[in-house]
Image (cartoon, rainbow, N blue to C red):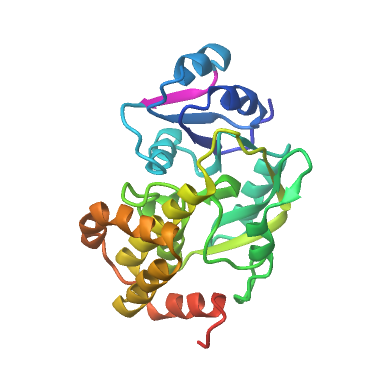
Amino acid sequence: MTEPPDIAVVVMSRDRREELLATLPRHEAPVVLVDNASADGSVDAVRAACPDVTVVPLEDNVGAYARTIGVARAGTEFVAFADDDSWWAPGDLARAVALLRAHPRLAVVNARILVGPEERLDPACAEMARSPLPRGDLPGPALLGFVACGAVVRTAAFGAVGGFDPVVRFPGEEERLALDLAAAGWAMAYVDALTVHHHPSPRRHSPTRRQAAVWRSRLLTASMRLPLPDLARLVAGAVRSGRPGVAGLLRALPDLLAALRRRRVIPSRVRADLRLLAGRAV
């Protein structure tokens, strides 16, 4: 196995034993698997089949916060994230490290994500490639967000803004982290010369349930980082969206107090970038 210097792959998973056994051997760097209280024997199966993988079993499902635990366990200068049904293309971890070293203000490099055996470009990547944010000296379009399973992060930047938090959980956990990185002066970029393969597991939530979970994350992130008028508009949008938005709003309520305790409104320059991305006047 070729191991790029100073990088590890952090994978979080729950109840996807077969997917893990297929993808973990594909990674070209040391792997830290953080298991979110699986009940399908994932931990024992990975330990038996992949003895080089560091397995961190959790007693409870902590969502995306598992990645923060994994980054701390990895202890490397850079960390690539992967899902249990995704893996990085050969050589691209080393190339990502080289890009991060060459651009000291860069905190996150997001690769293109090719979905399924037919290798369709993930629509999120097409959107990132069209980012209107000023690129400056970055190696690709500037971002104000990323897709975790296609991202390599600079550990120092990740840790300085707290990593993924235990409030937002999953999915949509990237937004709050990206806002905090931007607020701290870090940059993020999309680089389509890097590739991640994603073969979605058949064991996935229904689209309606996932949409509700995304709304929950958006509302909690807004509660933590956006001005009150923007939060009010988002709540109204959730209600107008119908069942998924209302369900997301109801699911967010039990964690609202925890979100408000973490409230720190992002600076005006980051809000201006959000408006630019939304197509509104700055």
Left or right: 217 as drawn, with respect to 93: left
Q: Is residue 176 visible?
A: no
Residue pictured at 48% horizontal, 64% vertical: 186
- Residue 204 painted magenta: no
Q: Is residue 213 visible?
A: yes
Residue pictured at 60% horizontal, 22% vertical: 21
Give the answer, above or below, for where 88 lies relative to 22. below
Give the answer, above or below, for where 104 lies relative to 28. below
| Along the line of sight, the residue nearer the viewer: 217 or 154 | 217
Horizontal and vertical percent position of residue 170: 43, 47
Which residue is the extreme one toward the front? 243
Left or right: 235 as drawn, with respect to 203: left
Give the answer, above or below, for where 60 lies relative to 220. above
Residue 257 in which image quadrant: bottom left
Range covered by the magenta-colored residues = 52-57
Magenta portion: prevailing SS class: strand
Horizontal and vertical percent position of residue 171: 46, 49
- Residue 55 painted magenta: yes
Horizontal and vertical percent position of residue 219: 36, 62
| Along the line of sight, the residue nearer the viewer: 227 or 206 | 206
Residue pictured at 65% horizontal, 48% vertical: 96
| Along the line of sight, the residue nearer the viewer: 49 or 16 | 16
| Quarter in which the N terminus is drawn | top right
Which residue is the extreme one toward the top? 48
Residue 261 in which image quadrant: bottom left
Residue 89 in which image quadrant: top right
